[in-house]
Image (spheres, rainbow, N blue to C red):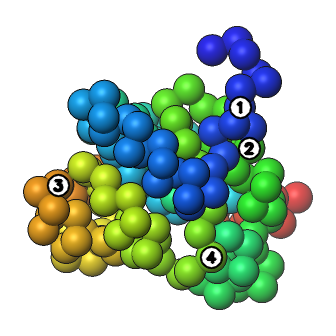
Amino acid sequence: MKRADLIPGKILTREAAIQQVVQWRLLGKKIAFTNGVFDLLHPGHIFSLSEAAREGHFLVVGLNADASVKRLKGESRPVNNQEARALILASLVMVDAVVIFEEDTPLELIKSLLPDVIVKGGDYTVEQVAGGREVMANGGRVVINPILEGHSTTSMIAKMKEH
């Protein structure tokens, strides 16, 4: 896609994401969902997002809001604010929509979208995935993908502090 002007349009409110998912479903398309902080994008994120995108026709990414990141990761995070993180995610070819959520988990967002597939990294079990029970009860699946070893935002931050 060379239409960079379309990138901001991929960042949706929860209400707009619900409407978009309804439209995609009317076309018979499968919706994949993943979520995270995505603070400093690295090859592990690209691998994870690419794998998630393979699970459906469209990929919706739930993005932790800044306040949520601070509660989960500490006061020094996020490095990039939610608008910057959302814009970077929206610029990726495999991402069809980005939705910022304020809660510590995407449970409420997942319950409102009810994607066909939730995809998480290998540090989770199916039982630990927020919204997994609800999606499976609706006939969907939970997929746990392997983690690409050697890449983490925490290690990137530590390396930057060394210099």
Residue flagged by tag 2: what amino acid is it? Leu
Q: Secondary structure at mark 3?
A: strand
Residue 137 in percent (x, y) is at: 12, 68
Q: Which residue is mark 2?
A: 87
| Left or right, residue 12 beside residue 143 | right
Q: Which residue is mark 1?
A: 7
Residue 74 in percent (x, y) is at: 70, 85
Q: CA distance from mark 4 to mark 2?
A: 17 Å
Q: In the rendered structure, which disc, 4 or 2, sits on the residue that comes first in sequence?
A: 2
Residue flagged by tag 4: what amino acid is it? Glu
Residue at 76 percent of width and 22 percent of height = 4
> Could one spot residue 10 in this view of the protein?
yes
Q: Which residue is mark 4?
A: 102
Residue flagged by tag 3: what amino acid is it? Arg
Residue 83 in percent (x, y) is at: 79, 55
Q: Which residue is mark 3?
A: 141
The residue lying toward the viewer, choosing from 47 and 104, is: 104
